[in-house]
């Protein structure tokens, strides 16, 4: 059990290190897409490249709170919610062309608020 935990921590550390390195190079969007390629769902609409992704259903009210926050922060952007076919029980939120993985941002200690791409 300890070995599995340490292996998982090592994988998370590698992903965080990779993303932070790309951030310093100004390539956060590409880094997130590459690091999370296995978890990024297919676009709900053609040309949609932006998602907030939960691995598991959010706590009650969290999804609506997040949608309201994103609509306020990006007044002109299309903010939509849907269920991912690839992630069972996951919630996908499309926000214009902003790319952010909610689970990853929380693991990074929320260093990068929604919409920040460099």
Image: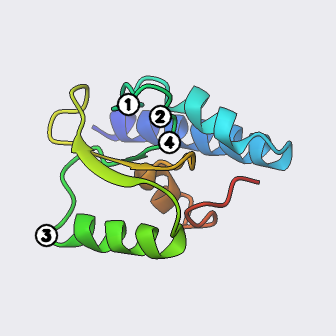
Image position of 92 (left or right of 75):
left
Q: Residues within 10 Å of mark 1 (few under 14, many from 20)?
A: few
Looking at this rendering, what residue extends furthest in the right direction? Answer: 25
Which of labels 1 and 3 is toward the front? 1
Query: How far, Cα to Cα, is label 3 from label 4?
Result: 23 Å
Q: Which residue is mark 3?
A: 60
Rendering coords of residue 63 (x, y %): 25, 64
- Is residue 66 positioned above or below 5 on the image? below
Residue 48 marker: 2
Q: Which residue is mark 1?
A: 45
- Whether tag 1 and tag 3 are in contact, CB under 8 A, the answer is no
Q: Which residue is mark 4?
A: 50
Query: How far, Cα to Cα, is label 2 from label 4?
Result: 6 Å
Q: Which is more toward the observer, 68 or 87?
A: 68
Query: How far, Cα to Cα, is label 1 from label 2?
Result: 5 Å
Q: Earlier in the sequence, mark 3 or mark 4?
A: 4
Q: Which is more toward the observer, 17 or 32?
A: 32
Quadrant location of the N terminus in the rendered image: top left
Which of labels 4 and 1 is toward the front? 1
Image position of 3 (left or right of 21):
left
Q: Earlier in the sequence, mark 1 or mark 3?
A: 1
């Amino acid at each position: 059990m300890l070995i599995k935990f340490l292996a998982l921590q090592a994988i998370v550390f590698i992903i965080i290190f990779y993303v932070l390195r790309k951030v310093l190079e100004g390539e956060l969007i590409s880094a997130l897409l590459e690091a999370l390629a296995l978890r990024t769902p297919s676009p709900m609409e053609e040309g949609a490249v932006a998602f907030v992704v939960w691995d598991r259903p959010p706590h009650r009210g969290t999804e609506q709170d997040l949608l309201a926050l994103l609509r306020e922060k990006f007044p002109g952007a299309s903010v939509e919610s849907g269920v991912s076919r690839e992630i069972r029980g996951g919630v996908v939120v499309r926000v214009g062309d902003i790319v952010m993985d909610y689970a990853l941002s929380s693991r990074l200690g929320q260093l990068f608020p929604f919409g920040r791409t460099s």
